Amino acid sequence: MKLPPTNAPNAQRWLADEKKSPSAGRRRLPLRRAFTLIEIMVSIVIFSIVVAAICSTLILVIRATEVGRVASERAQRQRVVMSTIENSLMCIQSFQVSPQYYSFIVQNGDQPVLSFAARLPAVFPRNGKFFNPDFGRDFRLRRVTFTLEPGPDRQNNLVLRQKPILMDMDPGEQSEPLILAQNVKSFAIECWDTNQFDWVTEWDNTNSIPPMVLVQLVLNGDNNDNSSEADSQRTITRAFSLPSTMMPTVVQMGIGGGRPPGGLSLPVP
């Protein structure tokens, strides 16, 4: 390395020459460092941890979404079933003069059955099959039957069958009933007995209508959890107070010239 001269004029000229030389700029550049292998490996590990955390969060979100979807579908099935049963029970009709058509049937056990006659509203399922003024069909008064039957996948289904009150059930309704709920664990019906002041599982007096009906529906879950907490989340119980009673024969047909005992007027049907 050349040393600068000692006198001032020569030193200034030497500094000027050094600045103009091609090697002067190269000497002033800083040294450049490259990434080492250890730094690259540490970066890869940190990136892998971040990607794993993102994937775990995404899996948890997908599982939570699936659980919410299953719970929403189960709640929707329960609402549809209970709404259908309620709409039919609120329109129940019964006449003492024709018990063979208006009998109230309740059966529990392995094959529960709930069957009665009702004048069904227009929003009832499959109403267009039985009521269509354009084709001369007016069978709003029908017998509805709710039963729990095994399905093709070895799961019990709650099905609904209907028929006009004075007609036999057609083969299509018999072979292809309306499936209200699939994968049903149990379907139980209880009636309020005014003599015992308690709920009973069997209604022996089919010629009368109970004042209240208790319906319990339990749906199976998609997991194998048989705990009581899981069953409580899949169970829905509703009590319905029936708005009508059986029409007695004396009111329906009348006696003594169409007037009931006591000189009272017959009510308008």
Image (spheres, helix red, strand yellow):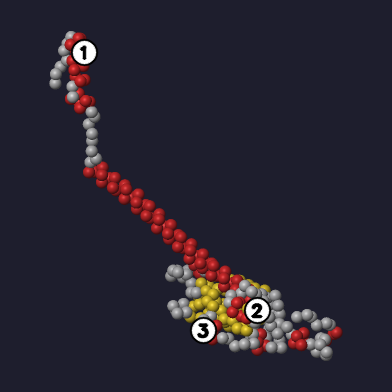
Q: Quadrant of the C terminus?
A: bottom right
| Residues marked 1 and 2 touching at CB (< 8 Å) | no
Q: Is residue 139 left or right of residue 29?
A: right
Q: Is residue 126 above or below residue 28?
A: below
Other residues around mark 3 within 10 Å, as few (<14) / some (14–19) / many (≥20): few
Inter-mark Cα distance, 1 to 3: 113 Å
Inter-mark Cα distance, 1 to 2: 117 Å
Would you name the residue on which mark 1 appears? 12
Q: Earlier in the sequence, mark 1 or mark 2?
A: 1
Q: What residue is at 79 percent from the left and 80 percent from the top? A: 267
Tag 3 secondary structure: helix
Tag 2 secondary structure: helix
Q: Could you say where residue 243 lies in the image, as x and y percent from the top left?
A: 70, 75
Would you name the residue on which mark 3 appears? 175
Which residue is outermost to the left?
Answer: 1
Quadrant of the image occupied by residue 213: bottom right
Tag 1 secondary structure: helix
Q: Quadrant of the N terminus?
A: top left
Q: Which mark is residue 133?
A: 2
Amino acid beneath label 3: Ser
Amino acid beneath label 2: Pro
Q: Is residue 189 above or below residue 66?
A: below
Q: What residue is at 45 percent from the left and 79 percent from the top? A: 152
Q: What residue is at 47 percent from the left and 79 percent from the top? A: 151
